[in-house]
Image: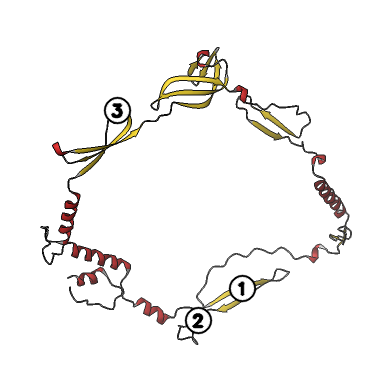
Amino acid sequence: MAEITNPTSIVRMQQLAYFKAKLDSLFQTKNLSSAIEGLTATTVEGAIAELLTKALGTEITFEKLQTPNTGKAATYRFTKGTGASQVTMDIDIEKDKMNATIGFVTIREEGGKYYDGSTEVTAADGVTGAGVYLKSQELADGTATGVNKYVSAEAVIEYITLGDQTGKVVTLALDPATHKLTADIGDGAVTMAKLAQNVQDILNSVADKAEKVSGATNGNFAGLDANGNLTDSGKKPTDFKEVQSPVTDPAANGEAYEFISGVSQDAQGVITPAKKVIPDAAPYVDAQNEGKKGLMSAADKAKLDAIAYAANSDIDEIFA
């Protein structure tokens, strides 16, 4: 290997990966220092390949048969060797042994006949009228045979019916076809009497206070006394602060170390900002002088920019 010409350069992770690739390539093709008994290979890579071939012996193949063994859903075959010495081993997947599937279906009537979807069904299948039925579909080796039987499920289904809704705040509607129930509150249907008593008390109190506000004298605003009753507050419109215009975020102008560290606001909305200065950072020296946070100086920035990093060409020199 060649001498390194730039030994003080900093190596990034990218260069470490490049170095590993160069090292792997070197040792994969490196000649063996001495022959290994039983092997003919002369390189490390060749010796590993030869050992794998000897360890595996005759090649073994694996496949899924296009036509499975008789009565099986699928067959996977391992084959070792060829010709007269060929040996095979099959793994069979059994077919589904389910004899039937059962589920609910809706039978509809059309022109005096009954249908399960588009298939006509009759009394011979167990259908005697429209409605919900329990359907049993016969299977053989996981495949439908076309033999279906139906049992009416109407006896176990209880449908909701609507009672008298005259004068009700909430009215209900029931779709007889889908059995979906919907509710609706009509405009103006909720009266004061339908509200909880505490809600009625609040509304009555608000109405009473609103009526008293209209009777405030001398142009003053009405206020509340200790008992919650409205009185003349003595406050006139001129006693209140006018609405201020909003202040937008200003654009930056110039450069400085100062910054706004906080803002306070009094009862009249007057804002008082506080400003501080950002110090220069100080390095750690010892336990008594632990340094401090701050801005990087121009001199330190120049040192940071001057750091040299290794490149792939520096690593290439090592392997030259």
**Type of amino acid under label 3:** Thr
Side of 266 relative to 220 (left or right): left
Residue picked out by circle 1? 262
Look at the image and tell me in which quarter the C terminus lies.
Answer: bottom left
Q: Position of residue 162 (x, y in %)?
A: 71, 27
- Spatial CA distance of label 2 from label 3 is 83 Å
Residue picked out by circle 2? 292
**Type of amino acid under label 1:** Gly
**Type of amino acid under label 2:** Lys
Q: Are marks 2 and 3 in contact (CB under 8 Å)?
A: no
Q: Nearer the viewer, residue 236 or 148?
A: 148
Circle count: 3
What secondary structure is found at the residue carrying circle 1?
Answer: strand
Q: Position of residue 144 (x, y in %)?
A: 41, 24
Mark 2 / mark 1, whichever is N-terminal: 1
Q: Position of residue 79 (x, y in %)?
A: 21, 39
Side of 182 relative to 50 (left or right): right
Mark 3 / mark 1, whichever is N-terminal: 3
Q: Position of residue 53 (x, y in %)?
A: 17, 51
What secondary structure is found at the residue carrying circle 2?
Answer: loop
